[in-house]
Image: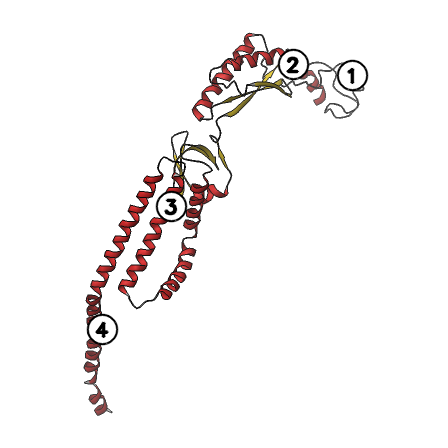
């Protein structure tokens, strides 16, 4: 047995040398293959760069042609689609340069499998891209419009294929994904040339409602910036608990700065005019009556009434301390 072990021992270095030789041969073949493929790789990179430059030039030309026109958004979409389409074409041509034996069918199959995988991986990105294209094409709003989307209200700064940039009224930039804007309700404040504002003013029940409405209407009509057509109006709106509410309505330019400025003037001048004419502007009041502040002739006080428990010895009318002392006794 020792002879057999001794005979097999020298074979180990030979096997190791053979494995190392095979490894070096594999590496050498890879290096030779890389250098053999290097001219094709360089040519493929040059081809892709050429398509990239052409794509940039086409996108710029389309944007320049449609800039300042009503079709500027369409030009922006077409420019981006042409850009990405030429890039994809450049990749395909570069692949055929590196691997001339790969046919069109194999490339399409490869793109199909890869497209499914990429679609699942970048589902949100593609949703935002498609929503952005639809927004740019249908133009529910444009750059410079004031909109409300979700909890955010502001001016649209930029519409991209992925997201819409909004500058809020307090000077913050909000980036909203286009898929959210396209699927959720959006209020376009500046969609039309005018917008209506209103405010409810309470007057006393003893005041002349018609006179109060006349004063409020004259005041609002005389404010510069309030549109004459449609004209402002004043309506009797609610018989509230402490006041008769009249609603003042007026139309203005829809921009936020103008709306806020006129809101301040309408409220300030209307309140001053009504107060100056002796019209009461009451605030909500509440009257509290204690149970002992009733007359003895109000009824049978031995029965439960006004929150008092029934019993043979109800508290007598009088001030609250005496009533409480009697009820406790």
Q: Nearer the viewer, mark 1 or mark 2?
A: 2
Which of 251 and 165 lies nearest the eye of the viewer? 251
Query: Percent position (x, y) of residue 250?
Result: 53, 20
Q: Earlier in the sequence, mark 4 or mark 2?
A: 4
For residue 225, above or below residue 174: above
Q: Nearer the viewer, mark 4 or mark 2?
A: 4
Disc 3 element: helix
Which of 109 and 220 lies nearest the eye of the viewer? 109
Q: Does residue 329 appear anywhere in the picture?
A: no
For residue 203, above or below residue 129: above
Give the color scheme: rainbow, by chain, secondary structure or one colour. Answer: secondary structure
Query: Percent position (x, y) of residue 76?
Result: 37, 42
Disc 1 element: helix
Instruction: Find residue 78 and name its label.
Output: 3
Please give the residue where the numbered disc 1 appears in the rendered image: 298
Please give the residue where the numbered disc 4 appears in the rendered image: 26
Q: Are marks 4 and 1 in contact (CB under 8 Å)?
A: no
For residue 27, above or below residue 70: below
Q: Earlier in the sequence, mark 1 or mark 3?
A: 3
58 relative to 264 in the view: left or right: left
Q: Nearer the viewer, mark 4 or mark 1?
A: 4
- Residue at the top extreme, as displayed: 277
How far apart in space, not on screen, are marks 1 and 2 (Cα)?
A: 28 Å
11 relative to 258 in the view: left or right: left
Which of 262 and 294 lies nearest the eye of the viewer? 262
Query: Percent position (x, y) of residue 199?
Result: 55, 21
Q: Choose top left, top right, bottom left or bottom right for residue 162.
A: top left
Q: Residues within 10 Å of mark 3 (few under 14, many from 20)?
A: some
Instruction: Name the quarter where the N terminus is drawn.
Output: bottom left
């Amino acid at each position: 047995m020792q002879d057999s072990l001794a005979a097999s021992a020298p074979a180990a270095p030979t096997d190791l040398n053979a494995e190392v030789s095979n490894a070096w041969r594999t590496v050498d073949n890879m290096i030779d293959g890389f250098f053999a493929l290097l001219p094709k790789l360089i040519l493929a990179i040059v081809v892709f760069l050429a398509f990239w430059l052409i794509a940039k030039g086409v996108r710029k030309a389309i944007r320049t042609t449609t800039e300042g026109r009503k079709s500027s958004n369409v030009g922006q979409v077409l420019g981006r689609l042409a850009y990405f389409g030429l890039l994809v074409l450049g990749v395909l041509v570069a692949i055929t340069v590196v691997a001339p034996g790969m046919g069109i069918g194999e490339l399409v199959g490869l793109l199909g499998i890869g497209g499914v995988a990429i679609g699942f991986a970048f589902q949100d990105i593609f949703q935002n891209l498609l929503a952005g294209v639809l927004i740019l094409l249908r133009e529910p709003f444009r750059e410079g419009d004031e909109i409300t989307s979700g909890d955010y209200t502001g001016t649209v700064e930029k519409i991209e294929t992925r997201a819409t940039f909004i500058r809020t009224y307090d000077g913050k930039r909000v980036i909203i994904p286009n898929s959210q804007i396209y699927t959720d309700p959006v209020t376009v404040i500046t969609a039309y040339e005018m917008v209506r504002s209103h405010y409810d003013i309470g007057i006393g029940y003893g005041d002349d409602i018609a006179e109060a409405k006349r004063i409020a209407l004259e005041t609002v009509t005389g404010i510069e910036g309030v549109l004459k057509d449609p004209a402002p109006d004043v309506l009797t709106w609610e018989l509230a608990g402490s006041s008769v509410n009249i609603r003042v309505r007026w139309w203005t330019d829809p921009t936020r700065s103008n709306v806020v400025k006129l809101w301040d003037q309408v409220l300030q001048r209307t309140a001053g005019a009504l107060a100056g004419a002796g019209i009461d502007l009451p605030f909500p009041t509440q009257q509290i009556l204690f149970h002992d502040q009733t007359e003895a002739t109000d009824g049978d006080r031995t029965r439960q009434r006004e929150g008092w428990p029934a019993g043979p010895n109800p508290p007598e009318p009088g001030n609250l301390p005496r009533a409480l002392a009697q009820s406790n006794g």
